[in-house]
């Protein structure tokens, strides 16, 4: 029978519930347990992909083609589980499912209510996400006390009653602020958020206290006394300079032992040697490179977390400190490419809308003409094609129909039909809903022999995840090939997935999003190849200097 660990947060939403849940999942996995992860998000949106990156940050995509909360990215980076559409449920998805059932008549004419209909659906979805795991981590988004998350909290309260407290454990994250001016540690926020939880019938078993420094024993005792949590279960979650240290730090605090005791689990001691290797690799690089990321949302770094983590992972694989210089694309439009003069590589990520595309193309042209390693992802590939079409192939006015419906050369256009990962034909038109109509999820990419892409991956066929609406227009394939552009990866139904420039040290771009598959323990071949190229470029630029 699956045991459940329900993770809630108080006072501040962005406490790091996702990383804490994923880190505990990693420790339990290191003890030989099968772990699954579920995130419940208290927003009404059914399709997170329609949310603004500036407000929501990054949207993660699963293998089975679901747009989800970013925390699922943390789950896959920490735990060797593959998340799915059953790993993330928004309030909107829950209500949508309940209303569909009501309209079908599944409730036999009953008045649809939060209790039992909505909470029953939430519990059903949690069980779906749990699968056959030994332990399922259930993270509740938002902050305790928010009206939006109350149905989720009520559902996990009911689970504790129905399954018994040996099978359901409640872990609550709080902030314990330190006030430097008075030298005080404030425990009141923790006390009050636990009070909120207890008022709806949930008594936390474990408190994970985010703090600047380890909690003194007297403060730990005070928190335990006022929250009715045993003292050993008041855990100091000290701010870490490296998120991959967190499983080790939480294990040292005895968190997994408490979980194993309370849930009566039988398992081996934790083997965290892989995580120690990750931490050691990050702490001991033998070289440093600077990568310019020319994006549209650089004022909100959360929009690019998977990308920045993938570059970090590549650094771990190559013993390289990867310094990321975030460059706003519109600044390149205003001030030119001077800010790119001293970088070792350039990366152009995805994004929607016309803003900043000229700045991105200037950066791409700069990388192409100056032989600087370049990696383009999604829009980064599309703009590389547009730039090449305009400036090399002589296709004046080449553009994407996303930006100009009447472009004389629509080298990028809205794809209306494609095969999904199961071989099912998907269709869309200009009139389709934006939500849920992207090409989503893991699909096969077939790589050309002799290409750099094939060399990087070392395989004829790979699987990568997609999230986009627009594709390369195959009518221009031959023209661009004749102009020197190489198309090195195709989907099984003939859509362009990868391009590269022969003769360039490293100029590679993909329509898919490889960052969704990168992990700290394994890295990802495309990012590892990119960082290796940046190292080589740096060595060429500084042949006689010591490399720091």
Image (cartoon, rainbow, N blue to C red):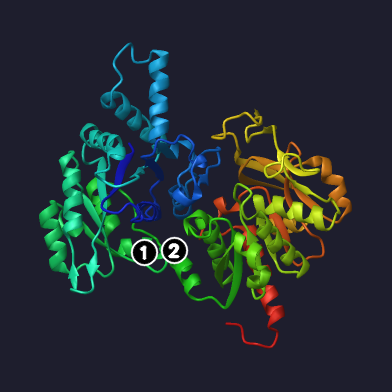
Query: Residue 267, position in %: x, y?
Result: 33, 51
Residue 368, image quadrant: bottom right
Task: Please tell me whether mark 1 sits on a helix, a strand or a loop.
Answer: helix
Q: Residue at x 70, y 55 (%)?
A: 509
Query: Residue 290, position in %: x, y?
Result: 60, 72
Task: Please tell me whether mark 2 sits on a helix, a strand or a loop.
Answer: helix
Q: Which mark, by number, is residue 22?
A: none
Given residues 417 and 245, the one toward you in this image is 417
Q: Are marks 1 and 2 in contact (CB under 8 Å)?
A: yes
Q: Residue at x 70, y 84 (%)?
A: 543
> Can residue 491 be seen in the rendering of this structure?
no
> Can residue 294 be seen in the rendering of this structure?
yes
Q: Which mark, by number, is residue 248?
A: 1
Q: Quadrant of the N terminus?
A: top left
Q: CA distance from mark 1 to mark 2?
A: 7 Å
> Disc count in the image?
2
Q: In the rendered structure, which disc, 1 or 2, sits on the residue that comes first in sequence?
A: 1
Relative to 318, residue 126 above or below: above
Query: Residue 64, position in %: x, y?
Result: 55, 37
Residue pointed to by mark 2: 275
């Amino acid at each position: 029978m699956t045991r459940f660990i329900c993770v809630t947060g108080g006072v501040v939403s962005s406490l790091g519930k996702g990383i804490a849940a994923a880190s505990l999942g990693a420790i339990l996995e290191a003890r030989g347990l099968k772990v699954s992860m579920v995130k419940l998000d208290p927003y009404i949106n059914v399709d997170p992909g329609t949310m603004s990156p500036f407000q929501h940050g990054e949207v993660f995509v699963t293998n089975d083609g679901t747009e989800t909360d970013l925390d699922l990215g943390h789950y896959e980076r920490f735990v060797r589980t593959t998340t799915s559409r059953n790993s993330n449920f928004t309030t909107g998805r829950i209500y949508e499912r309940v209303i569909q059932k009501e309209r079908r008549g599944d409730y036999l004419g009953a008045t649809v209510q939060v209790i039992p209909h909505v909470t029953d659906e939430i519990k059903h979805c949690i069980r779906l996400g749990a699968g056959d795991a030994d332990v399922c981590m259930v993270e509740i988004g938002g902050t305790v006390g928010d009206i939006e998350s109350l149905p989720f909290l009520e559902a996990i309260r009911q689970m504790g009653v129905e399954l018994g407290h040996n099978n359901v454990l409640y872990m609550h994250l709080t902030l314990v602020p330190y006030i430097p001016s008075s030298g005080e540690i404030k425990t009141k926020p923790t006390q009050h958020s636990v009070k909120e939880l207890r008022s709806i019938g949930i008594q936390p078993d474990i408190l994970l206290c985010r703090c600047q420094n380890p909690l003194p024993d007297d403060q730990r005792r005070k928190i335990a006394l006022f929250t009715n949590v045993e003292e050993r279960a008041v855990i100091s979650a000290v701010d870490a300079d490296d998120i991959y240290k967190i499983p080790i730090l939480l294990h040292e605090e005895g968190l997994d032992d408490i979980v194993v005791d309370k849930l009566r689990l039988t398992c081996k001691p934790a083997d965290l040697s892989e995580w120690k290797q990750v931490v050691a690799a990050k702490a001991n690089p033998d070289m440093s490179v600077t990568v310019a990321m020319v994006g549209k949302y650089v004022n909100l770094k959360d929009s690019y977390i998977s990308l920045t983590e993938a570059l970090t992972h590549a650094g771990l694989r190559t013993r390289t400190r990867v310094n990321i210089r975030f460059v706003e694309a519109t600044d390149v439009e205003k001030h030119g490419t001077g800010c790119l003069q001293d970088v070792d590589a350039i990366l152009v990520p995805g994004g929607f809308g016309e803003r900043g595309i000229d700045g991105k193309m200037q950066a791409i042209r700069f990388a192409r003409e100056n032989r600087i390693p370049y990696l383009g992802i999604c829009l980064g590939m599309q703009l590389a094609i547009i730039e090449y079409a305009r400036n090399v192939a002589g296709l004046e006015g080449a553009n994407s129909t996303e930006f100009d419906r009447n472009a004389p050369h629509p080298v990028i256009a809205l794809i209306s039909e494609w095969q999904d990962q199961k071989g099912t034909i998907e269709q869309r038109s200009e009139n389709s809903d934006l939500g849920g109509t992207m090409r989503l999820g893991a699909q096969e990419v077939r790589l050309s022999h002799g290409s750099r892409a094939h060399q990087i991956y070392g395989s004829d066929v790979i699987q990568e995840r997609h999230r986009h609406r627009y594709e390369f227009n195959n009518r221009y394939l031959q023209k661009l090939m004749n102009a020197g552009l190489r198309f090195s990866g195709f989907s099984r139904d003939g859509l362009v997935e990868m391009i590269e420039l022969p003769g360039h040290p490293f100029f590679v771009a993909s329509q898919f999003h490889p960052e969704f598959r990168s992990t700290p323990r394994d890295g990802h071949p495309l990012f590892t190849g990119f960082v290796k190229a940046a190292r080589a470029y740096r060595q060429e630029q500084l042949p006689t200097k010591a490399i720091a």
